[in-house]
Image (cartoon, rainbow, N blue to C red):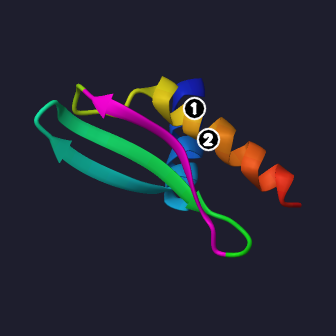
Amino acid sequence: MALTWVCRILAQWVKACLRLRLKAEEGIARVFYCTTVGKKIVMLHQFMKKTDKTPLRELETARRRMREIKNAHT
């Protein structure tokens, strides 16, 4: 039940966060970013994707950084 709750929270957060998918010789990279007041783009986190699913740790890192940015602008 707790895992379902975490998945729902993350699904809501992912809708608010934007993602880039970059393909290179080394593999596929993901970049999470968001916009702030003044229409600035803030890169929150990047990593090389090695599995089909995005690791929870990578999502949490980006989510924590987005909260820090949003709190700094309120």
Q: Does residue 36 belong to the magenta stretch?
A: no
- In the rendered structure, which amino acid carries the disc numbered 2? Arg
Q: Which numbered tag is attached to residue 68?
A: none
Q: Image quadrant of residue 39?
A: bottom right
Q: Residue at x 56, y 39 (%)?
A: 62
In front: 64, or 31?
31
The reply to whether callout 1 and callout 2 are in contact (CB within 8 Å) is yes
Quadrant location of the C terminus?
bottom right
Kindly identify the residue that appears in the image at 40 percent across and 27 percent down: 55
Q: What element does badge 2 sit on?
A: helix
- Taking the image as shown, residue 51 lies to the left or right of residue 64, namely left
Rendered view: 52 above or below 72:
above
Q: Residue 73, image x and y in percent?
A: 83, 60
Left or right of residue 26, residue 40 in this image: right
> Residue 60: which numbered mark, if any?
1
Cα distance between the residues tagged 1 and 2: 5 Å
Residue, disc 2: 63
Instruction: Pick whichever, 52 or 24, lies toward us.
Output: 24
Check the image and name the residue furthest to the left: 25
Residue type highlighted by circle 1:
Glu
| Above or below 2: residue 23 | below
Indicate whether 48 appears above or below 36: above
Q: Is residue 44 magenta?
A: yes
Q: Please say if 10 is above or below 71.
A: above
Q: Residue at x 84, y 52 (%)?
A: 72
Residue 51 in the image: state x and y as whole percent.
23, 27
Residue 24 left/right relative to 44: left
Specify start and end residues of the magenta stretch as a single range.
Answer: 39-49
